Amino acid sequence: MLAKPFCELMCRALVPFKRTLAALVLLATCPIAIGQTYPLRTVKIIVPFAAGGPADNYARFIAQRLQDALGQPFVVDNRAGAGSVIGTDVVAKSPADGYTLLLMSNAHTVNETLIPNKPFVLLRDFVPVTPINYSDLVLVAHPALPDATLQDLIKHAKAQPGKINYASSGPGTPYHMAGELFKSMAGVSLVHIPYKGSSGARSDVIGGQVELMFDAVTIMADQIRAGKVRALATTGRQRSAVLPEVPTVNEAGVAGYEATIWLGLMAPKGTPKAVVDRLNGAVGKIASQPEVQQVWAKQGATALVMNPEVFDKYVRDDVLKWAGVIKTAGINAD
């Protein structure tokens, strides 16, 4: 067996000749060179959500820029269904070579507890690669609700437990989980009204059939400015660039509250660390570009940049966070 330093020198020396057959065979088995030469062919990013939604749009945004940065096609493949389980399982069963990636969100960290009988376990069958960004939600109220501030709402809800309703796009969705986290941390009793999608919930809040809703900042911004709903607070760690005049839930008195929709990439367990590091570095550079951050800010999104080890902890902590909320609220997937 060749000594490790000599092997590394040989691998690096072969990189400029990676298009020759002999070099490709040798490079494919060299850990040093795998990271330097990856990717050598098309990379597929499986999005386990419907085409046209925010997750799909950001996946395509990142895919195009990864293609420009790394010199090989990055293509998006939508495999929606079963609350993200179908597409995620496809990636879990794919070769651990870096050529099939998962576009994941905190829907996955929620599902770890909400859907216990999945054919995969997130942190057993995947390795976290890189975060991409997070998007704020905003808590809105119909103008008929007398509460002008978040603290007013909390006092009202405590005085009349179970009398105020909030809508969501369905059990286990980010909008529902934001509401349950708020109930738990603020110590209030609100009644959850689930809908089969955001549009019905949004229409009923605007129409006054339901008092409250956590919704996407960019979708509700125009309704807020038109006076159709009142913004009480946004849910991120800092104020939203879309609604900078609106305080965060944390600022408004619920210390430590944060409930965003975040996105990242994962790969099948066993994917070479050199490949994970190369992808992490490439996405981090994209997300750190001022022009990218400006585009995302207009869409209500903020870049997330972490190395793979920090992102791994971020995912694990998120699983525990939502597990606690689900247990406390007694939420199930039905």
Image (cartoon, rainbow, N blue to C red):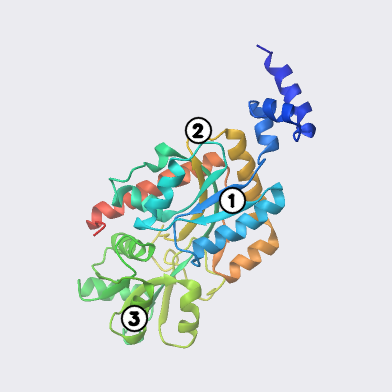
Which residue is found at the position 66% from the left and 35% from the top?
35
The amino acid type, in three-letter code, at marker 3 is Val
Q: Is residue 5 visible?
A: yes
Seen at 61% across and 37% down, the residue is: 275
> Disc 3 and disc 1: Cα gap in Å?
35 Å
Q: Is residue 147 visible?
A: no
Could you tell me residue 327's position as x and y percent?
A: 25, 52
Observer-side mark, 2 or 3, equals 2
- The residue nearer to you, when weighing 314 against 22, is 22
2 or 3: tag closer to the N-terminus: 3
Lower sequence index among marks 2 and 1: 2
Cβ–Cβ below 8 Å for labels 2 and 3? no
Three-letter amino acid code at the position of disc 2: Gly
Q: Position of residue 73 (x, y in %)?
A: 65, 51
Give the left or right position of residue 137, taking residue 281 as reference: left
Q: Quadrant of the N terminus?
A: top right
Which residue is denoted by mark 1 in the rendering? 305
Q: Mark 3 packing: few (<14 Cα in 10 Å), some, or many (20+)? A: many
Q: Residues within 10 Å of mark 1 (few under 14, many from 20)?
A: many
Q: Nearer the viewer, residue 228 or 122?
A: 122
Residue ID for mark 3: 205
Q: Quadrant of residue 208?
A: bottom left
Provide the secondary structure element on which disc 1 rests: loop
Left or right for 162, reference 92? left
Q: Mark 1: which amino acid?
A: Val
Q: Is residue 189 left or right of residue 302?
A: left
Residue where numbered disc 2 is placed: 270
Label 2 to label 1, Cα distance in Å? Answer: 22 Å
